[in-house]
């Protein structure tokens, strides 16, 4: 399995947490507790070493672009981390 985790840092003069939460859910993210705020579960069972660049270019970057576009102007900082084969 492949997962992308996001940490959101809010600004006091930016979008409300409830608004950001709603937008993240609309993008397919689920909430999580711990080191990250949201997680996106990819519909990919495995990425072989030779397919990593293709996955990043064709899927991961597009997801990050969609998140950035959706949250534009909300004054949040985002940190993305993608892992495979976690349990």
Image (tube, rainbow, N blue to C red):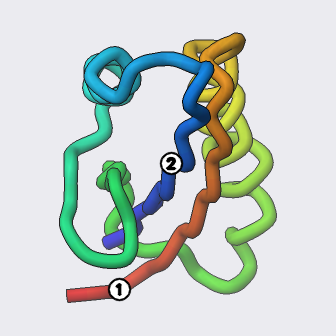
Q: Position of residue 69 (x, y in %)?
A: 67, 15
Q: For the residues carrying marks 1 and 2, which lies nearer the camera in this image?
A: 2
Q: Quadrant of the C terminus?
A: bottom left
Q: Residue at x 50, y 17 (%)?
A: 15
Q: Is residue 6 left or right of residue 21?
A: right
Q: Is residue 33 left or right of residue 21?
A: left
Q: Position of residue 31 (x, y in %)?
A: 21, 49
Q: Position of residue 7 (x, y in %)?
A: 49, 57
Looking at the image, residue 24 lies above or below residue 84: above
- When asked about the image quadrant of residue 70, the answer is top right
Asked which secondary structure carries label 2, the reply is strand
Looking at the image, residue 20 lies above or below residue 61: above
Q: Quadrant of the N terminus?
A: bottom left
Please tell me which of labels 1 and 2 falls first in the chain.
Answer: 2
Identify the residue position indicated by label 2 in the image.
8
Q: Residue at x 71, y 28 (%)?
A: 65
Q: Residue at x 20, y 60 (%)?
A: 32
Identify the residue position indicated by label 1 in the image.
85
The residue closer to the viewer here, 81 or 22, is 22
Q: Is residue 65 left or right of residue 21?
A: right
Checking the image for residue 67, the label placed there is none
Q: Residues within 10 Å of mark 1 (few under 14, many from 20)?
A: few
Question: Which residue is situated farthest in the front direction here?
Answer: 12
Asked which secondary structure carries label 1, the reply is loop
């Amino acid at each position: 399995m492949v997962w992308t985790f996001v940490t959101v840092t809010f600004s006091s003069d930016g979008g409300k947490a409830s608004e950001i939460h709603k937008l993240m859910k609309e993008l397919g993210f689920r909430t999580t507790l711990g080191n990250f705020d949201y997680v996106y579960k990819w519909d990919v069972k495995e990425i072989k070493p030779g397919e990593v660049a293709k996955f990043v270019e064709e899927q991961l970057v597009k997801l990050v672009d969609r998140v950035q576009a959706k949250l534009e102007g909300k004054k949040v900082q985002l940190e993305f981390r993608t892992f495979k084969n976690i349990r």
